[in-house]
Image (cartoon, helix red, strand yellow):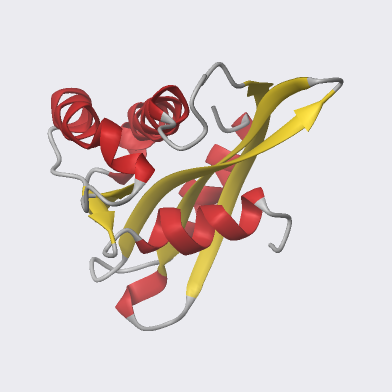
Amino acid sequence: MFTQEQVESLVDLLTTLDKNTKIYLGCDSVRYQKNGRWHARYATVAIVHMNGKNGCRIFSKVEHEPDFDVRKNRPKIRMMNEVTKVCSLYVQLAPFIDEFDIEIHVDINLDPKHGSNCAAAEAAGYVLGVTGLEPKFKPNALAASFGSDAVAHGRA
């Protein structure tokens, strides 16, 4: 998931911080067409809220993959890919971050009016099963809805 250099940089940062530090993990994606086929740009982030009051540092990874969702308004495969990526990041970082307060943020809306809702139940179970943590969903999933979103759209 993250490069060795990113992990080392994150670990170095954490050694300078106190127990009030919080870590938010999230993933978001943007769908786009290339050569007549649909693809998704996935942005996975770890946001370190330093000492609970000293601002944040964002570590990110961007990946491009084919998008196999047939129905654009019900992006279940893409939503579950986001969940898989954020859980993989948690597994990679867990040995280094377990002493801090950690949240997993999922860019899925629990309101049935929104297309991402089609993956809500599966996402909740997957995150809980892999990480042992209850995920945060929109509108409480700031790492995914804002941090990852900005990286996915090239704003960060």
Image position, residue 131 (x, y; %): 20, 31
Position of residue 131 relative to residue 115, above or below, is: above
Name which residue lies at 51% across and 60% down. 147
The answer to whether any part of residue 53 appears in the image is: yes
Q: Is residue 139 left or right of residue 76?
A: left
Name which residue lies at 36% across and 83% down. 53
Position of residue 29 relative to residue 2, above or below, is: below
Q: Is residue 149 left or right of residue 117?
A: right
Image position, residue 70 (x, y; %): 52, 19
Question: Where on the picture, by quarter, is residue 64?
Answer: top right
Name which residue lies at 31% across and 67% down. 21
Image position, residue 10 (x, y; %): 51, 49
Q: Quadrant of the N terminus?
A: top right
Name which residue lies at 34% across and 30% down. 87
Seen from the viewer's position, the closer of residues 42 and 19 is: 42
Q: How many numbered circles are shown?
A: 0
Question: Where on the picture, by quarter, is residue 39?
Answer: top right
Image position, residue 67 (x, y; %): 60, 21
Q: Quadrant of the C terminus?
A: bottom right
Q: Residue furthest right?
A: 35
The answer to whether any part of residue 100 appears in the image is: no
Seen from the viewer's position, the closer of residues 48 and 71 is: 71
Position of residue 53 relative to residue 15, above or below, is: below
